[in-house]
């Protein structure tokens, strides 16, 4: 190691140490966000410099002289050797979703510290490692998918588990994301009209890119983003027109219906018309807003008002029930480890990698940046007054339906807030009310508005708030559209095994049937979430978290199994350790969600509790009407949780079986790794390790 | 004056390279890259038009998992 590298490593270690020390020593006073930013950046860079480099050379045996599929199978289209900075950009844009924005916001109910620590540790030792490992394994196997790799190396079970697991995650994810945007848009004509305007804008960009200027992505995106920004301003104008205002003022249920219908239409329309152009818009907005947020946090270096740890670590939290262990890990989800990333790392990205050495930047680096986005979301949530944070994020069924009742309950927890304060805040944000806007998007938007407001003009708070809402919703709708489409393909794959014509992805009746089935599935969960007086997110997000961590555990099982099979058992701890942790976390969370006698936590206990109250006639007329559906849903959620856990343990046991055979020297499926070929790309041998 | 002209000259290639990075990042230059590849490796075989290529690229892009949660 050269002198400069040693010096910079020492500076990083020292900076990270001082920042962590600063956080540790200021436990009972507000802490500045810069401490957290500094600690995070130092930790990511140290992880990248040392741990990732060690894994690349020692564990994964990255070989810069080996030709990658992009070089061997170069077809000028999907297999294409690409500069690593460009692949990094593509990969980051693909993995960055709304999860790291929503998860940390919800996890902030435990205080800023637990979530922040897990975002950092989980990413550096778990999420980044998973993404890099799967990326390399797939690059060595001509860009095969996680499911295919599992099938090739272990047999049909792993591939089938990955398929079913992914499909179920897509359903739960779409429902919870739908719920997040419903809660952001209900009775908010400004937000609703802005979001509605993004649909014709996306179609216009789609027509532009298809008919008028094919493939001119930059031109189309610039036009689209300008129009969408204009729509944010126009939304404010609409909000002040009594007639127009009413046309965009909807309750939660009609909005949910509109989203379900929209997603169904988007899934069956040709992609170029709506999905692809919306994706360009959301990618531009996503990268731009994330960069702007980082700059604004450094400029304003706000104080975090949330305590380091709150009383809700005991499991009585208003956003979702459950104690710190295991629920902070389940809730943070994608900001630390996301199983979904393994699907991207074994899809488009490995076909672009021009040199194996690039997997460190692309796989490990992108996830570190994604984790940094989660840190920023945590900062945006915890710089709010805790009373305000809880008032925005708690369902009416938990804190009370009137502003006064809610403010009273929350103040009683030791987080003072008044109805007047909330009214003034809502007015400043151009909203009617901010109470019970569960799901995390509105509180993140208030946090972002306050950061942007103090950096770039405080009088524009309402504009910034609606810009942030529009950014989150556009982002989420893209995930919803893309998820519905991918889910449709997977469902058709499954249905095709029952009756072959249903598997044909271009046969219109099959497309309609599978799309309807999928949208109905998540539409059902969305509907129940909307009618749930506790906000719905408290049920759906933990379910999503368990599912997503389960998929990560499946990916880590595949990675560990391949490492052990190929004779690198002594290094397999690199993936086995995060796997063991995830298995522990997801299993204990699933156990509690199913069998806990506390109706605040356990699905079955909640169903039993509600059934008893219904039988005793102790519910209001409104709640009596929805109680049977809520009871059924809680039982269904319990069954789903059991299914997730069963899939996870089947995969782990299957992987163990293969490893035991290997250690006993019994015959195994041969490795599916493509044979070595020397790279002839310029710089292959010199590529940085 | 001469110095200003020189610094303007230095600025221009930087802007141009920034622009090409931006084009590569967004996929704006995908068709040019395909044409270059085609000319180098498959000269003489039929070449897709810009419209055909973009439609094909879109179909490939959206037939797998390429967006996350």
Image (cartoon, rainbow, N blue to C red):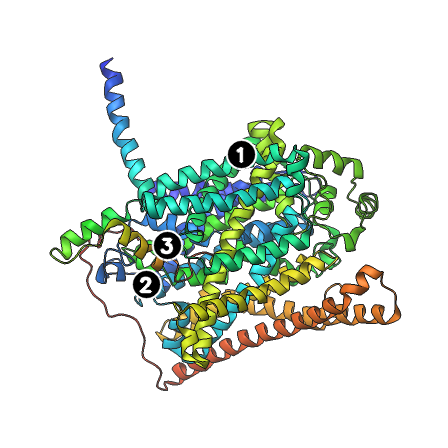
Nearer the observer, disc 1 or disc 3?
A: 1
Q: Mark 1 = which residue?
A: A296
In front here: A266 or B58? A266
- On whether disc 3 and disc 2 are found on a single subunit, the reply is yes
Point out residue A409 in the picture as x, y percentages from the top left corner. Answer: 82, 48
* Element marked by disc 1: helix
Say whether disc 3 or disc 2 marks the residue closer to the N-terminus: 2
Nearer the observer, disc 3 or disc 2?
A: 2
Alpha-carbon distance for marks 1 and 3?
A: 29 Å
Q: Quadrant of residue A500?
A: bottom left
Q: Mark 3 = which residue?
A: A360
Q: Residue at x 48, y 71 (%)?
A: A491
In front here: A678 or A171? A171
Q: Residue at x 80, y 39 (%)?
A: A419
Indicate the chain on which mark 1 is placed: A
Point out residue A6 in the picture as x, y percentages from the top left corner. Answer: 38, 44
- Is A616 displayed left or right of A348 in the figure? right
In front here: A637 or A496? A496
* Element marked by disc 3: helix
Alpha-carbon distance for marks 3 and 2?
A: 12 Å
* Element marked by disc 2: helix
Q: Mark 2 = which residue?
A: A139
Alpha-carbon distance for marks 1 and 2?
A: 37 Å
Can residue A222 be seen here? The reply is yes
- On whether disc 1 and disc 3 are found on a single subunit, the reply is yes
In the displayed structure, A664 sits above or below A681; it is below
């Amino acid at each position: 190691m050269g002198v400069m590298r040693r010096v910079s490593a020492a500076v990083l270690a020292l900076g990270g140490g001082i920042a962590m020390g600063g956080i540790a020593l200021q436990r009972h006073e507000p802490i500045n966000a810069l401490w957290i930013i500094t600690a995070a950046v130092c930790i990511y860079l140290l992880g990248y410099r040392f741990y990732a480099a060690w894994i690349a050379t020692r564990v994964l045996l990255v070989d810069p002289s080996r030709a990658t599929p992009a070089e061997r199978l170069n077809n000028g289209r999907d297999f294409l050797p690409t500069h690593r900075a460009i692949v990094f950009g593509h990969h980051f844009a693909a993995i960055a979703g709304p999860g790291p924005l929503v998860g940390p916001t919800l996890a902030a109910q435990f205080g800023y510290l637990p979530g922040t620590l897990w975002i950092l540790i989980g990413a550096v030792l778990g999420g980044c490692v998973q993404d890099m490992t799967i990326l390399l394994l797939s690059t060595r196997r001509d860009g095969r998918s996680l499911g295919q790799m599992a099938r090739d190396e272990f047999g049909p079970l792993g591939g089938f588990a990955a398929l079913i697991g992914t499909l179920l995650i897509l359903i739960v994810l779409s429902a919870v994301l739908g719920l997040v945007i419903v809660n952001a848009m209900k009775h908010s004509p400004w937000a609703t009209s802005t979001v509605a305007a993004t649909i014709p804008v996306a179609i216009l960009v789609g027509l532009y890119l298809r008919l008028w200027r094919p493939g001119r992505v930059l031109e189309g995106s610039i036009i689209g983003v300008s129009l969408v920004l204009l729509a944010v301003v126009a939304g404010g104008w609409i909000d002040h027109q009594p007639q127009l205002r009413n046309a965009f003022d909807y309750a939660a249920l009609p909005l949910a219906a509109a989203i379900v219908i929209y997603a169904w239409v988007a899934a069956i329309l040709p992609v170029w018309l709506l999905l692809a152009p919306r994706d360009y818009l959301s990618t531009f907005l996503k990268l731009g807003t994330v960069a702007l947020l980082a700059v604004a946090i450094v400029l304003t270096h706000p104080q975090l008002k949330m305590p380091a740890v709150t009383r809700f670590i005991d499991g009585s939290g208003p956003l979702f029930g459950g104690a710190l262990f295991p629920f902070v890990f389940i809730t943070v989800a994608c900001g630390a480890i996301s199983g979904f990333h393994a699907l991207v790392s074994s899809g488009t990205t490995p076909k672009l990698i021009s040199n194996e050495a690039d997997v460190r930047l692309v796989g490990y680096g992108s996830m570190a940046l994604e984790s940094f986005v989660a840190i920023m979301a945590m900062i945006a949530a915890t710089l709010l007054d805790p009373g305000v944070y809880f008032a925005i994020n708690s369902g009416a069924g938990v804190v009370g339906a009137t502003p006064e009742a809610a403010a009273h309950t929350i103040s009683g927890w030791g987080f003072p807030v008044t109805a007047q304060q909330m009214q003034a805040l809502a007015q400043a944000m151009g909203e009617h009310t901010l109470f019970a806007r569960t799901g995390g998007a509105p509180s993140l938007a208030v946090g972002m508005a306050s950061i942007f407001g103090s950096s770039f003009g405080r009088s524009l708070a309402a504009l910034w708030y609606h810009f942030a809402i529009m950014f989150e919703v556009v982002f989420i709708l893209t995930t919803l559209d893309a998820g519905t489409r991918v889910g449709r393909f997977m469902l058709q794959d499954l249905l095709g095994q029952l009756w072959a014509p249903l598997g044909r992805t271009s046969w219109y009746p099959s497309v309609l049937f599978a799309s309807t089935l999928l949208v109905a599935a998540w539409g059902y969960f969305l509907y129940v979430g909307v009618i749930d007086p506790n906000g719905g997110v408290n049920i759906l997000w933990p379910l999503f978290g368990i599912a997503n961590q389960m998929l990560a555990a499946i990916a880590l099982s595949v990675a560990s199994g391949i490492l052990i099979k190929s004779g690198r058992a002594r290094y397999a701890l690199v993936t086995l350790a995060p796997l063991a942790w995830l298995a522990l976390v997801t299993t204990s969370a699933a156990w509690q969600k199913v069998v806990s006698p506390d109706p605040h936590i356990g699905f079955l206990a909640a169903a039993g509790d509600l059934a008893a109250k219904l039988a005793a006639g102790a519910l209001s007329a409104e709640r009596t009407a929805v109680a049977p559906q809520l009871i059924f849903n809680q039982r269904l959620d319990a069954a789903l949780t059991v299914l997730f856990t069963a899939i996870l343990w089947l995969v782990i046991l299957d992987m163990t079986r293969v490893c035991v055979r290997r250690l006993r020297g019994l015959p195994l499926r041969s490795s599916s790794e493509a044979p070595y070929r020397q790279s002839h790309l310029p710089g292959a041998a010199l590529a940085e390790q | 004056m001469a110095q200003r002209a020189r610094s303007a000259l230095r600025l221009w290639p930087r802007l141009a390279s920034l622009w090409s990075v931006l084009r590569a990042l967004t996929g704006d230059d995908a068709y040019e890259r395909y044409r270059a590849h085609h000319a180098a490796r498959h000269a003489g075989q039929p070449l897709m038009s810009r419209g055909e290529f973009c439609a094909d690229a879109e179909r490939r892009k959206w037939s797998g998992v390429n967006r996350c949660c």
